[in-house]
Image: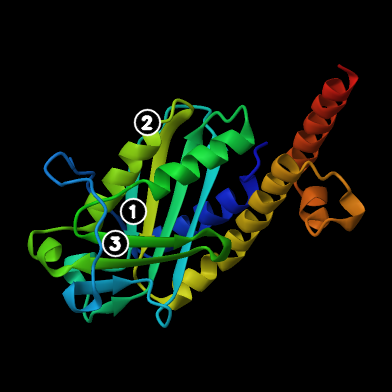
Amino acid sequence: MGLFDEPFREVEDFIKEKQDLKQIRELPLKSILNWSEEASLILEEESALELGHPGQGSLSFLVWSQALKKNQDRLLILGPDLNELKGKKAPFGQIIRVYGSFPDEYQCYCQLRDAIYQTKLKGLMMRLIPSQQVIWCRVHQTALAQGFSLSHLGSALIKKIKALSFVESVEVIFITSSKKDLNQLKPAGEEVKRIAGALVKMVEEKDFDCEACEYWEVCEKVLELKQIKKRLNKKGKRWRLR
């Protein structure tokens, strides 16, 4: 069993449903050696596209699974790629599934989160609000004209995440189809947010008063959170005895 097993399966079911409907496709992984990895500030008048605009819909979260076998890195898209979009604004979802082993769940979560934040590409301005699971991007006119695509972004994310020693493989799913499709994954995203919130609170606040905790229900539901709490409690007692 793993910390994010339930939302991980929900994403898996979503992918299978869209594959059965032939609505999802695989994008090629690209070398980004010739694309500068640098932060960009893009003004509205310079942008060719806005992804995840508040009026269009936005969703971003990551989940992981203990890898029982080596999996291939994969990049999927539901909806049009950047050069296929009609109009300047579009909904945007970025769902990342990581396979590997996660001995210290908190440290692994923080490192994965940081790897995503640190992914920068010239011609792309990306803003993430983890507490709201919102992602908002602007693509520069020049970058789009030069062929920038979601293959570049997905490949850069996979490269950055796979630099972490505990990661076996990565799957990135982009959604540009509709707000309705994003909403279909909202329940999985909410579950991820609650699990991650409980994990962070336990580790950072050392608060084990379950009765007064807003995450009580999710901790009762997710066995791994109980195990983490027990481990942290035991570690704290050993420290106090020294």
Specify which label sits upstream in the sequence, 3 or 2.
3
Q: Position of residue 21 (x, y in %)?
A: 39, 65
Looking at the image, residue 217 sits to the left or right of residue 26; the answer is right
Three-letter code, disc 1: Leu
In which quadrant is the N terminus drawn? Answer: top right
Give above or below for 192 relative to 166. Answer: below
Residue at 67 percent of width and 46 percent of height: 200
At mark 1, the secondary structure is strand
Q: Work out how far the residue at label 2 is from the one at label 1, CA to CA, in angstroms.
A: 21 Å
Three-letter code, disc 2: Ala
Residue at 52 percent of width and 72 percent of height: 183
- Report whether residue 190 is seen: yes
Specify which label sits upstream in the sequence, 2 or 1.
1
Residue at 67 percent of width and 53 percent of height: 197
**Closer to us: 189 or 70:** 189
Q: Quadrant of residue 30?
A: top left
Q: Which residue is mark 2?
A: 163
Q: Which residue is mark 1?
A: 76
Three-letter code, disc 3: Met
At mark 2, the secondary structure is loop
At mark 3, the secondary structure is strand
Q: Nearer the viewer, mark 3 or mark 1?
A: 3
Q: Nearer the viewer, mark 3 or mark 2?
A: 3
Q: Which residue is mark 3?
A: 125
Q: Work out how far the residue at label 3 is from the one at label 2, CA to CA, in angstroms.
A: 22 Å
Specify which label sits upstream in the sequence, 3 or 1.
1
